Image (cartoon, grey):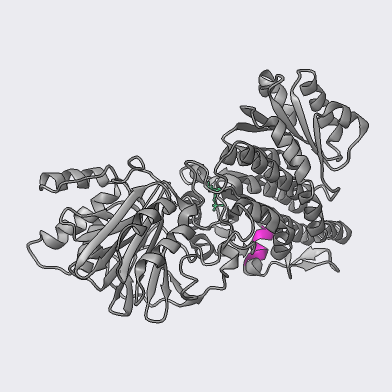
Amino acid sequence: MCGIVGYVGSKDSIPVLLRGLKRLEYRGYDSAGVAVLHENNLHFIKKAGKVSSLQSFIDDTTIKGNLGIAHTRWATHGEPNDINAHPHIDHTEKIALVHNGIIENYDSIKQALIKRGVPFTSNTDSEVLVQLISELYYNNNEKISFEDAVRAALQEVIGAYGIVVICKDEPNKLIAARMGSPLVLGIGEGEFLIASDASPIIEYTRNVIYLDDNELVTIDDGHYSISKIDSKNIVNKTLTKIDLTIEEIEKGEFPHFMLKEIHDQQHSISDTMRGRFNLEDGTTQLGGISDYFSNILSASRIYITACGTSWHAGLIGKHLIEEYARVPVHVEYASEFRYRNVIIDSDTILIAISQSGETADTLAAIRKTKKLGAITLGICNVVGSTISRETHAGIFTHTGPEIGVASTKAFTAQLTILIMLALKLGRKKNVSKNRGKKLIRALRDIDQDVVSILKNSDEVKKVAKNTWKANNFLYLGRGVNFPIALEGALKLKEISYIHAEGYPAAEMKHGPIALIDENMPVVFIAPQDDSFSKVLANIEEVKARNGIIITITDKKNNLLESLSDYILTIPNTHKHVFPITCSIILQMLAYELAICRGCEIDQPRNLAKSVTVE
Ligand code: G6P
């Protein structure tokens, strides 16, 4: 949520910053801006719209400089326009700041500064920070350094921030600080980058340091030092080498990241499983949680917490863990969990699921659980992310960077990990070796299943071409496929702006059936498993009301064909692997519907990939 990048080194910072912003654009894209220091002057340009529009303004100027900061915004306070875009500049026009996060007490600070005669130009919370730093630096009875002014300002604000700030009067210095919003420092040959994640950095260096909360880094004349914001104590941090490749963060021949990531699933699910099976013994190996495995095994209850798509993975995780391991599992939205009087004791385990590993609510839920004395585990995709570092232990999904805002391959990787976890726990309990082997064999065949699903794209396009004008869609599934109905509906809403709801198929009679008429497409998830005859009855009910029936199944039959307007058939597989393969065809359907509607697939309106504010 908002992407920030800073550069200092021998290169002109402008191209580095713009490339960095493009890589970070998945975090927000309603406005963008840069500020650089050059020959004792502070230059800045900020514009509503995407980074490409900022770039065209910059191309018409001669703006350059070896030290600069940049920002791509997802608006919280103040509408997306040129003035509210970052960087924010203080009223003396000497300091520039970019901010990711929310300053909760901005109004009281703003009123106090206005009383002191400080003029404000924007409606943002972020401007307060730069004006406060300016006031503390330039309008102070005692002379303090710029760094101390930043420190002092940060101690007055309440809320979350990742900031980078520069000052014309200390022109070799770049200062960044973190409290709640991620920042990564890249250390190159005679150059430094600081960014919201590692993607803008890897072209220049693989050596990074992940900042933690309450840390401030000052880069000054080719040196950096990291200290605590409040105590000024120096912190010695370890350098991490990142092994992300540029190809992984580019979309290659695909028109959209989302489509690339849907196709990545031909191998990304296997990547998630690699080295983690023991077919012989019908079980799995999950090294990341081995230190806590006995605690998980003896847990009296498990909470799963997450947001968005990851929460849907959690619902399936509940189903699987309860089925195989026979431990009660409660799935909670992290935003609710963090403020609820949850029942947590030392026998409770919290599993937090997060693709980015940075979602603010999920992180808060982890911190709360740790305070209450329980063990926390993370299922994350981004190595080095805050959640992966703050949980006691965890399992990485290893699915590669996911950049499209609508989550696809991260979701199927999360489901894969949850199956492996449930099976591992189950095998230590009452699940037989043979049952384990069956599940593993189905998972092992998944690459070819995905290839065959992707071959259905013409069929999917046909459905999309005939239904894209609908204003509403209903997705129905039962049991372990009910969360897949929720996820299918979420995908559609996110990228096509069609209103969609997911429901347990049998619950349709308790409300949604009132909406069904000849304009309502209803997507049925109908594998030929033990719930098939029940779902078939629900299909009949929709047919009787003239709804448009789109059936996803693993085996056609005459009755299904006569009832359905469209049938999408995917390979038959284990009933607990089916949710993974089924979600892929629903991703394809959402994608094709959004294409028919001419939507911005990778940057849907109002959304951001990584929600680092509450
Ligand atoms: C945002 C994204 C979703 C994602 C959710 C949770 O809403 O748009 O795609 O599922 O955040 O993100 P996380 O990184 O914690 O999985």
Identify the residue at horizontal 60%, vertical 36% (top origin).
Answer: 597
Identify the residue at horizontal 82%, vertical 60% (top origin).
Answer: 440
Identify the residue at horizontal 36%, vertical 65% (top origin).
Answer: 14
Q: Nearer the viewer, residue 556 or 312?
A: 556
Residue 295 lies in the magenta-colored region: yes
Q: Position of residue 276 (x, y in %)?
A: 73, 67
Q: Position of residue 213 (x, y in %)?
A: 38, 62
Left or right of 379 in this view: 276:
right
Identify the residue at horizontal 39%, vertical 64% (top origin).
Answer: 17
Q: Is residue 212 visible?
A: no
Number of marks in the rendered image: 0
Q: Position of residue 456 (x, y in %)?
A: 79, 46
Left or right of 157 in this view: 260:
right
* Type of secondary structure dominating the magenta stretch: helix
**Which residues fall within the magenta stretch?**
292-298
Q: Tell me if residue 551 comes above or below residue 588 in the rendering.
A: above
Residue extending farthest left: 141
Q: Position of residue 357 (x, y in %)?
A: 53, 58
Q: Is residue 282 visible?
A: yes
Q: Nearer the viewer, residue 417 or 495?
A: 495
Residue extending farthest front: 60
Residue 586 lies in the magenta-colored region: no
Q: Tell me if residue 527 comes above or below residue 430 in the rendering.
A: above
Left or right of 59 in this view: 147:
left
Left or right of 603 in this view: 266:
right
State which quadrant residue 474 falls in.
Answer: top right
